[in-house]
Structures are given as C-alpha cells and as structure tokens.
Amino acid sequence: MPFPEKSPNELRLPPVARLALVLLSTFLIVYGLYVLKEIITLLAFSLLLALLLLPLSQRLERWRVPRVGAIFVCLILLIAVLSGMVWLISMQLGNFASEFPKFEQKMTGILNRAQVMAEEQLGIKRSQQISELRKYSQNLLQNSGSYFTGLLSTTTNLVANLSLIPLFVFFILLYRDFFRQFIYKFFNDSRRSRIDEILRKIYTVVQGYLVGLIVVIGIVAALNTVGLVVLGIDYAPFFGILAAVLLLIPYIGILVGSILPILYALVTKDSPMYAVGVAGVFGLVQVLEGNFITPYVVGSKVSVNPLAAIIAFFVAGQLWGISGLVLALPITAILKVIFDNVEGLKAFGFLLGEPEETRPKENVAVRTVRQQMKKLKREVKETVEE
C-alpha cells in the first residue's frame, strides 16, 4: 500500500520540528486511546468475535441462507455456547460455596496457629495482634462503601457493554462489504488487489490466533483437571477450567489461576505437600503450554517476538486495564501485518517480528530468476483483474 509521492511544493521541516510533530501526534493518539478506552475495547472485542464467526456465516450464505438469517444463527450459537459455559461455572461455584463453612473453620484453625507462633517465636502478644486486626477491620469497614459502589458501577458497566457486543457483531458482519468499499475509497491510490491481500492476511492472522487460542485453552483445561484429579483435589474441573480461561491474559494468566487451588489445597488438606503438588502441576502445564502446546497449535500465525509482546502488554494494560492485556497480542499482530505491507513502515514490522534464522546464501542467478518469476506472476494477476 504505497504512500503518494511527495509534491515538489511540499513544505520541508527541519528534523527537530518533524520529531516534535511525531511526538505530539503520538501523545494525542495515546491520550485519545485512553479517553475512548470503553468504546475502543468494545469495538475490538466485537471485531474479534465477528472474525471468529465469519466462516460460519459465509458457509450458511453459500447454502442460500439470507445474510441476516445467517448472522442470527451465528449469534444464537455463540450466545448458547457462552451461556452453557456460564451455567457450568455457576454450578461449580454453587458447589464450591457449600464448602465455605468447612473452609472457614479450617482457616480459623490456621489463623489461631499463626497467632500462637507469632506470640511464641516473634514475641508479639495476642492482645497486640487483636488490636491490629481490629484497626485494619475498622479501616476496611469504613472503605467498604466506596469499594462496594465501585464494584457495583464496574459490574453494571460490564453487563451493559457485554449486552452491546452482539449488536456490534451483527452490524460488523452485515456491513462487511460496505466497510471494504470504504477502505477502497480511502486508499484510492492503491490497487484493490493489494488491499484485498492485506485484509486477507489480517483475517488469517486473527482467525488463526483465535481458533488456536480456543484449542490451547481446551488442552490446558484438560491437563489441569487431570492433574488435580490425580492429586485428589475437590472441584478439579472448576479450578482447571478457570486457570485455562485465564490464559486469555498471556504469561500471567495461568499463574493467577493457580493461586486459588493452591490455597484451597493448603486449607482443606492435612499436609502442605498437596499445595506443593498443585503448584507443581500448574508449573508443569505452564511449561508445556509455553514451549510445546501454543507454538505447535498456534504456530507462526502470530509471529511477534516476546519483547514486543511484553511491551505491548504493558502499554495496553496501562491504557485499557484487563481488556488491554487480552487485546494486546492480536492488535500487535494486526499492526505487524499492516507495517509489513506499507512501504514506509516495513522497518517497524521487522522490529515487531521474530528474528530471521540464519540461512545459507542463495545463488545470485537463482535469486534473480525467482524475483523475475514473482514479478511476472504479480503483473499477470493485476492485468487479469484490470
């Protein structure tokens, strides 16, 4: 997608002025992304779901189902799957809540032993411990109103946003040809075949990432559950699926998901070795997921180097919170596709990608013939399209 050539009358600015304009533009863009984070994250999630449902919608349309009907079928299936997952999790949570009295009794015993140990080993009297606990409890009660209000507001906004996602997904799928025509008109100096190629690459990358992520979550959930069942931990499916779903937050998701089963094993089991075993299971699964499962399933669909991914996580997390951590990798992959296909931005695409492996030098004659064949093939394709 080449940029228009520079006009001879174009104003040339000194390097310092250009740098200042770039920095100012970057600041304004980042500030706009932060201010509009709710609508941007909502549209981003809707776009990802639309790309995930697009193959099914296209297949139904090839079966002569009207586009509106095909989209409704896709949304009904999506809502049914999500509702089933929520129902299963709520059932597990209900069973888990029935164990709270036993859990509370066990925690009380652990706290009593900790108080005795603090009094005997550290010389902290129990009366002093109780006074400190009372002080922290009073502070917690004083701030509980603001905490509850914030939680209620966040929950209300989340439910409202989730209710809008199916609507956005419906219109994105319905007007996809309209949006493609808009892109054609916006880049009127570029060939449509080039634009179609970039859009196809973006679609391939995003869909490959999403499908691969779903498969990885299923495999990790099965491994977590089997490991916890072998250890004899109650509610193994709940803990295993919860930790797997948290893989949506790369690198740290499975670590966060392992904390609850470790604490549960520490409280409900007589020996602390069960908690060590749970930690070992999740650690082993994380090693397998990071080094074998994800590279094999997702493959090279998202060829973003780890350093760029970590920086993207930090930036997106600062801008959009938890939603940013989930969206960081697919958005970075989309940017890399765009950078790789825009002449003036290829260096940034190279910076985001994986380092190229050292290859033996290719013969000059062979390389020349290969380049000429690619050029001829591209010219024939463009001539046929015109």
Image (spheres, rainbow, N blue to C red):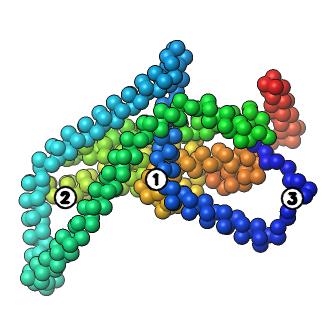
Q: Is residue 337 above or below residue 36?
A: above
Please name the residue shown 31% across and 61% down the image.
150
Badge 1 local density, few (<14 within 10 Å), some, or many (20+)? some
Find the distance from the CA under tag 1 to the CA under tag 2: 39 Å
Viewport quadrant of the N terminus? top right
Q: Taking 379 as reference, is 301 left or right?
A: left
- Kindly identify the amino acid type of the residue bearing the numbered disc 3: Glu
Q: Where is residue 75 in the image (x, y as percent from the top left)?
A: 41, 30
| Disc marking residue 38 | 1
Evaluate whether residue 359 shows in this view: no
Please tell me the numbered disc located at residue 15. none
Counting from the top left corner in percent of width and height, residue 244 is at 35, 45
Q: Position of residue 372 (x, y in %)?
A: 86, 34
Gap in angstroms between the C-alphas marked 3 and 2: 70 Å
Q: Which residue in the rendered view is the most extreme toward the right?
A: 8
Residue 3 as seen in the image, left or right of residue 299: right
SS class, disc 2 = helix
Foreground mark, 1 or 2, reads 1
Relative placement, left or right, of 250 versus 21 is left
Q: Which residue is drawn at 33% across and 41% down?
A: 221
Q: What kind of residue is marked 2?
A: Leu
On residue 266, the disc is 2
Residue 164 seen in the current view: yes
Mark 3 neighbour density, 10 Å: few (under 14) some (14–19) many (20 or more): few
Residue that label 3 marks: 10
